[in-house]
Image (cartoon, rainbow, N blue to C red):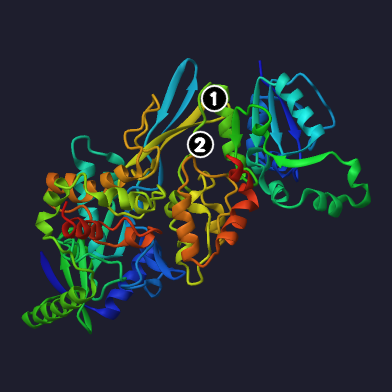
Amino acid sequence: MKPKVGFFSFTSCEGCQLVVLSMADKLLDLLGAVEVVNFREASSYKGEDYDVAIVEGALSTVHEIEEIRAIRKQAKILIAIGACAHIGGINCIRNFDNQFEIKKAVYGERAANFDSILAQPIDAVVKVDYYSRGCPPNRDGEEFVEIVTAILQGKKPYIPNFPVCVQCKMKGNVCTFHKEKPITCLGPVTRAGCNAHCPSYGNACIGCRGLVEEPNLNAHQETLSGAGLTVEESLNFYRMLNGMMEVGK
Amino acid sequence: MKQFIIKKPKLFELIDKLARETTVIAPVKQENFTSFAPITSAAEIVWGAPQTVIPPKQFLYPQSEDLLAYEFGNGEARITGLNAVKERVLFGVHPCDLNAIGQMDRIWAEKNPDANYLEKRKAITLVGVDCLAPCSSDAICLRLNGLDPKGRFDLFLTDIGSAFYAEAATKKGEALVEGLRAPAKAADGKRLTAVQKKRTALFDKQEKKLLPKYKDLSKLMKANIDHPVWEERGKLCYGCGSCNMVCPTCYCFDVQDYMHVSLVKGVRSRVWDGCMTEEFAKVASGENFREDRSHRLRHRTYRKLNYLYDKWGESFCTGCGRCVKACLTKIVSPLEIANEIYSRKI
């Protein structure tokens, strides 16, 4: 019997669901292996009998926290997909500002009617079994399919725990720090698995897959200050997607 | 070894012809560096500096290579074999990389000969080009015995002004320049010697000095397993594996199975791996034999200057300097490590 899968969305752009939908032939392969019972971007049907919950987005309201708890209760397996669900992502930028001011700026006079709270990743509230990392999930959803395949096989999915530099060098890219006009980059501390997508197109890694398990942050601070960034600028660079790291992630 | 003289325009014509008829891989411009890539004409080649970001090992031992494909059906597994191998010319390889390829030829042929490497190697015509000036301030080839190619090529070219002085170490090398070569005369040999002498003096002036003697490197390493240099440098290591990926003599790999989501077919690939990354020495129980960055740095340096040196009688750092450049925290240079150990006796 095929496992029943539900997709759920919290605070996010819902781009992760779109990545899954845009996998074309890989999506058809996937649909041959699982039965989708809940997928807002694809269907208005809403089944509640899922075994596997695939969750995108960060948690940023009291209501969302209640919802994720209910999902966790139903799902045998919970997969967090995308940077918002995995590390809080871009939503966490707000955590470093005055919450009252922010609420006022967004909702104006009706601010008091909204139950918004500090943004947090899914595993700040419930147990997450697997992470499909990245903003958006990388390699045209390839790693996401690999995770599902590993679950079907009953084995641990292979997720690299080395920095982006490994795959960036494999591609033969000129290091962002060694370009004629150097660019500061989070690659040396960020978990690979994206095939160094951003540096391959001439951009810096912004850390969307989260940090490796043992990032050498002291070494990175030296590298960044060597490239002319102040401590504050370095922190802001991390906070773009990895703000939660500073509260013990 | 046979010596010839080849006029420059003739060589360029040959490259153009080869590029049309077969695959020629040579250094081409890549931003402010170069990279080995297939070319369509000799005009694309960057001679000398700057150096390529990664060495040409990728054409003999690719970053990721499918070893076999499998399919399940009717109660059995069907396995299909290796990829087809194409004839290719690898052109413009510097002496440091020629030495590295020579070393890899021995490594991959030892004990369990690796057909994936050896088949590709056999299909490659290796044309080296001598360096007349250091390719970067990070180069340490003269110090690590990497500047003399020691016959590890099919054909080797040295620019002696109006022509190339060509040495052919194999029949393949001779055949490549059949019809456009002239035998080298005594006067050409003299010009070659003069060019080489001037070159070596320039390298000696510009390259960082190696303080211990080359032949003592292995002993020096062995005696300094507890030197503080490992801890001091190791604490600045990212574990990013950049030094491994850009090294022409790093050849460790990981094997991964990629099962299709239908669970009826898949491929088994080998992918470059690096001993400086955190999980390289981690085993199934969760035990990590080299958890400390300092231990990993020591291991890498020992591989180059001690273990393989003792086994094969030469340094397995050929001094290309790529790791020196790639390492963002400047900890990994085998030459600098050797110098530091030598000058700071414990």
Residue farthest along the left direction in this orientation: B186
Q: Nearer the viewer, residue B143 or B328?
A: B328
Give amino acid for label 1: Leu
Q: Position of residue B193 (x, y in %)?
A: 11, 77
Residue at (53, 54) in percent of width and height: A186
Of residues B26 and B257, which is closer to you in this image?
B257
Chain letter of disc 2 in the image = A
Q: Looking at the image, which residue is at 52% across and 48% down? A: A190
Rendering coords of residue B117 (x, y %):
29, 44
Identify the residue position indicated by label 2 in the image.
A159
Residue at 84% over, 27% down: A45
Q: Mark 1 and mark 2: span between their CA atoms? A: 19 Å
Q: Is residue A12 above or below residue B52?
A: above
| Viewer-side residue, B222 vs B309 | B222
Q: Is residue A113 above or below residue B343?
A: above
Res. B146 mark = none
Give the secondary structure at mark 1.
Answer: loop
Q: Amino acid at mark 2?
A: Ile
Mark drawn on residue B263: 1
